[in-house]
Image (tube, rainbow, N blue to C red):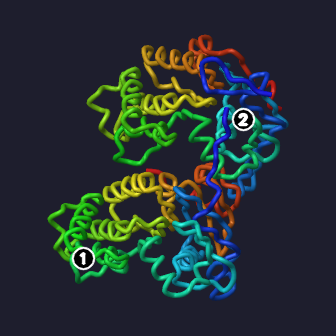
Amino acid sequence: MSYVSENSAIVTRNDGALLTIQNLYKQFELHTQKNTSIPIFNDLSLVFKKSECTVLVGPSGLGKSTLLKCLYGNYKIDQGEVLVHFDDENVDMATCSAQMINALRRNVIGYVSQFLRVIPRVPAIDLVSEPLISQGCAPEQAIEKAQVMLRRLSIPENLWNLSPTTFSGGEQQRINIARGFIADYPILLLDEPTASLDHRNVQVVIELIHEAKAHGTAIVGIFHDEHVRDQVSDVTINLAEVAQ
Amino acid sequence: MKKPILEENAVLSVQSCQKLYGINRGCQDINFDLYPGEVLGIVGESGSGKSTLLNCLSGNNQPDHGAIIYRDSVGMAQDIYEMNEARRRLLMRSEFGIVKQNPKDGLRMRVSAGANIGERLMAVGDRHYGDIRTKAGDWLTQVEMPKDRLDDMPFEFSGGMQQRLQIARVLVTRPRLVLMDEPTGGLDVSVQAKLLDLIRSLVSELNLSVIMVTHDLAVARLLCDRLLVMQQSRVIEQGLTDQVLDDPQHPYTQLLVSSVLTP
């Protein structure tokens, strides 16, 4: 049972769910540090729907970033399921192959982290166009879209052909944002994307989020800035209430 | 939304590979599949069996047990140690590319840079001198070396240039599977960055599959899709690179990751 939305290629389950967490358990076992166990999630279940922005809130240390990392396959899932709903089947990220997770990251799930980690010497414009090229987009077209994105995020044109390893924190964050929003992923995870941005660029990120939602993207985000939260949030989940 | 379609046929399938020189010395119980366009990193302490494994995969060291099955460019899958010597040697110099840790082991030091590259081309049947020279020059540019060094001897080059020349020599025949032992080991960081960028772009342009042994977890993070962590001849953990590095499960991997200095 599925349908195609009007203005995008995103097809979903009937209730619009793109991603479901079922009975998730996660704890960290620190073998080298006195065998400490740090429990994070204990039977967590959540649903994320198309065109909805879910905002995770709660005091730090409760696992907001950990949850995003579990959804991106970056952290291992001890128990439970993280289901991505496709037209005629689900893929469980807790058990699928590394090859599948890499394919999901290429085509389905985008992630904007707070830190930029890239190969030195690769120009900003190439980093931003790369997600599109890896989806099979023609390089000229990808570069064109990357230029539009960099311009929107006010990255000065004379920096486009330089490696962002020497950029300021805010500029590096905007490169991450550009990489996250350029490829129209059906699912987008945002870990404090506006943390080190000025007012004008925060406004651009809010616009990008609205555009992605209009396009059908399911967004899961952490935003410390209340102003941003109010503008983008459809559903608010307080991990202090649901995670324990 | 459409489920991504995965490449079903592995380029290389390693099944229960074992080569032991003593108790837990060498490699054993090694199992993995490598798909087209994938970069697999092998990390672990010295003596954990990384290079033994790489030698088994590169046709230089027959395992005691297990199978190393390579699917060639026409789709025929065969154990590399079950094919005849002539075919294996042909594969090794055409579809396989082996980059040695020390460029002196992978290059012929007393013939020119151009001849080093040209030799691999002649080995797969190229005969036209002009073509070979042009291709050699193109590859020199690809690895960011000046074309006018074509007639210089490798021993006149710096270590970083020798390593890049070795990579040009290996890639000129457009191999499908590249095996690298510490490709950036012993190079200063600026040359290392250059090489990382080069390897990354060649992987995506040529859809190469790569297996790389490395000590350097930062290099592994930037280049590898997946990691195998070895300790005392066995793979103790494997998975997505960032998962292994950011959420390591095995005590040894945790120790390895927590011991790295980040600049």
- Residue linked to disc 1: B115
Percent of width and height locating residue A211:
54, 17
Residue in the foreground of this view, choosing between A179 and A199: A179
User: In this rendering, do the residues under marks 1 and 2 share a single chain?
Assistant: no
- Which amino acid lies under the numbered mark 2 shown in the image of this protein? Phe
User: Is residue A195 something one can see in this rendering?
Assistant: yes
- Residue linked to disc 2: A86
Identify the residue at horizontal 17%, vertical 74% (top origin).
B152
Q: Chain of mark 1?
A: B
Identify the residue at horizontal 75%, vertical 55% (top origin).
A35
Residue in the foreground of this view, choosing between B80 and B109: B80
Categorize mark 2 by other alpha carbons within 10 Å: few (<14), some (14-19), many (20+).
many
Quarter where residue B256 is shown = bottom right
Q: CA distance from mark 1 to mark 2?
A: 53 Å
Percent of width and height locating residue B169:
33, 71
Percent of width and height locating residue B123:
35, 79
Q: Which residue is outermost to the left?
A: B148
Identify the residue at horizontal 72%, vertical 17% (top origin).
A235
Query: From the viewer's perspective, is B263 left or right of B64?
Result: left
Q: Secondary structure at mark 1?
A: helix
Q: Secondary structure at mark 2?
A: loop
Identify the image quadrant of the N terminus of chain B.
top right
